[in-house]
């Protein structure tokens, strides 16, 4: 059925009446940081807008974990309020298992008996809870393009015998998607693809019912992260396919504009800020002189810059707490000790309550070399914590140019330290930035995000498919 004029009952104005699928390579608690948060937030948006009578879109994941693992993931997300209905989160490999052993009917039916395995290729055999094989995946070590391999995916029957194969991961993924969507009859299908790897594999999905909305979560260029910097092979290949999607959603206007300037104007590019729910700041927890760094301790975050800038600011009574974990932890601890700063700077580890950390902060520092979306900056502002940050692409400028903090040239430790000193020694300005911060963050409110997402979906659904 057409959806140009049909709307979901009780849904946001303009949201088309359709079946909604959200595709994610994986959704695992504690992994992929902002990606997982943004993907689940988008699913909750659509649930709140009336999709499937409030149950939300079907979340389709493609990681080959165990059914028990996936059940635990769903439960964790539900307990934290990140998943409206656990039955809506499905996994390809959970559904590839037949109750009586071997592969499910949809997988067996898709297998080509004439396709056989290459004896020189290593395979990872997948088994059910009783140890019975149902599929085997080719192992492509050290190859970031493993998903594009044509090596067969083997399919087993209930007796443990190989009965055929599919043509690579593309064949496997598409077989499952066709199985899932067969239940929808002739209804329009809106697919929100949250993964570039998945996007590459469905860019030629020519089903006339389907409209593919491809979201972007990350930086598309390499160091030095300028708009004209080189790109890795995955991004280069992806841009060749971009016009096949019915819309491409960028999280910030700056990144969208840089893409258009580099590759040319296209009707597919749109901006939808990732939603961040409002909070009630607890200003009574604010601690004078407390500077906070909150995030993964990874090389690209340049936490060492924040440490050196804080020490250069040299504000009496100030102290820094660095919350998070990661591969840089030992190096950063050694740096703090080498600078004899253990009495002023502490690596505080992981926190189960980042909201409390941000409510306590007098100031938040972000020294990252690059960013994909400004979730951390917006969250700090929502809690009334001003942000001093490097002007690094993408997203930070999109937020702080409207207030709530200070931008300094990326990589300039002296400028970062001067900004920290300026705010910590000027309580009136610090209070002013803190007061305006929540209103600046409101641009990333769920309602504004939903309005933008709805407009993109409605336009795509009312036009012919691009494939």
Image (cartoon, helix red, strand yellow):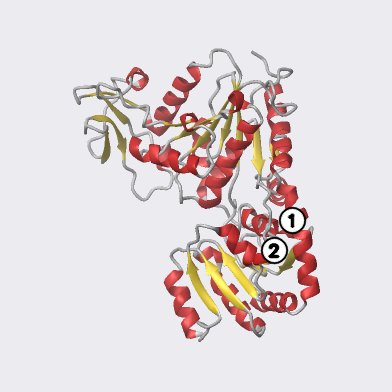
Q: Looking at the picture, does residue 444 appear above or below residue 188? A: below
Indicate the quadrant containing the C terminus: top left, top right, bottom left or bottom right.
top right
For the residue carrying disc 2, how many other residues have a C-alpha within 10 Å: few (<14), some (14-19), or many (20+)? some
Residue 243 in sight in this render: no
Q: Residue at x 36, y 38 (%)?
A: 64
Query: Which picture quadrant has residue 107?
Result: top left
Closest to the observer: 44 or 147?
A: 44
Q: Which residue is mark 2?
A: 283
Secondary structure category for the residue under label 2: helix
- List x then y, in percent, for residue 353: 54, 58
Q: Which residue is mark 1?
A: 438
- List x then y, in percent, for residue 275: 66, 44
Q: Looking at the picture, does residue 341 appear above or below residue 431? A: below
Secondary structure category for the residue under label 1: helix
For the residue carrying disc 1, how many other residues have a C-alpha within 10 Å: few (<14), some (14-19), or many (20+)? many
Query: Which picture quadrant has residue 321?
Result: bottom right
């Amino acid at each position: 059925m057409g959806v140009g004029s049909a709307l979901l009952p009780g849904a946001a104005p303009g949201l088309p009446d359709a079946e909604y699928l959200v595709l994610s390579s994986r959704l695992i608690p504690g992994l992929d940081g902002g990606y997982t948060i943004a993907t689940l937030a988008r699913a909750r948006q659509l649930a709140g807008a009336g999709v499937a009578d409030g149950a939300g879109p079907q979340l389709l994941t493609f990681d080959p974990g165990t059914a028990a693992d996936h059940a635990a993931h769903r439960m964790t997300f539900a307990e934290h309020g990140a998943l409206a209905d656990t039955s809506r989160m499905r996994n390809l490999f959970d559904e590839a298992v037949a109750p009586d052993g071997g592969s499910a009917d949809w997988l067996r039916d898709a297998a080509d008996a004439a396709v056989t395995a290459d004896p020189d290729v290593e395979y990872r055999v997948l088994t059910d809870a009783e140890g019975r094989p149902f599929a085997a995946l080719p192992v492509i070590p050290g190859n970031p393009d493993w998903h594009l391999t044509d090596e067969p995916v083997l399919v087993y029957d209930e007796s443990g015998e190989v009965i055929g194969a599919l043509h690579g991961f593309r064949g496997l993924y598409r077989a499952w998607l066709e199985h899932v969507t067969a239940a929808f009859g002739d209804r329009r299908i809106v697919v929100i693809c949250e993964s570039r790897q998945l996007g590459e594999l469905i860019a030629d999905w020519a089903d006339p019912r389907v409209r593919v909305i491809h979201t972007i979560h990350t930086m598309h260029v390499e160091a030095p992260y300028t708009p004209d910097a080189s790109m890795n092979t995955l991004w280069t290949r992806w841009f060749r396919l971009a016009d096949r999607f019915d819309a491409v959603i960028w999280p910030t206007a700056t990144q969208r504009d840089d893409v258009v300037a580099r590759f040319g104007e296209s009707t597919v590019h749109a901006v939808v800020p990732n939603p961040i729910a409002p909070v009630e700041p607890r200003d009574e927890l604010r601690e004078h002189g407390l500077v906070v760094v909150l995030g993964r301790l990874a090389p690209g975050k340049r936490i060492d810059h924040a440490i050196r800038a804080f020490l250069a600011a040299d504000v009496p009574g100030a102290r820094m707490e660095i919350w998070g974990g990661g591969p840089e932890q030992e190096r950063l601890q050694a740096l703090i000790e080498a600078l004899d700063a253990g009495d002023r700077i502490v690596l505080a580890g992981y926190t189960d309550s980042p909201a409390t950390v941000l409510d306590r902060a007098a100031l938040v520092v972000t020294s990252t070399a690059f960013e994909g979306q400004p979730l951390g900056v917006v969250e700090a502002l929502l809690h009334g914590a001003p942000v001093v940050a490097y002007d690094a692409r993408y997203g930070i400028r999109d937020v702080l140019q409207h207030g709530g903090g200070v931008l300094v040239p990326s990589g300039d430790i002296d400028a970062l330290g001067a900004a920290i000193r300026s705010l910590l020694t000027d309580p009136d300005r610090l209070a002013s930035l803190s007061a305006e911060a929540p209103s600046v963050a409101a641009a990333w409110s769920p309602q504004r995000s939903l309005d933008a997402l709805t407009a993109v979906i409605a336009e795509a659904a009312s036009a012919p498919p691009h494939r």
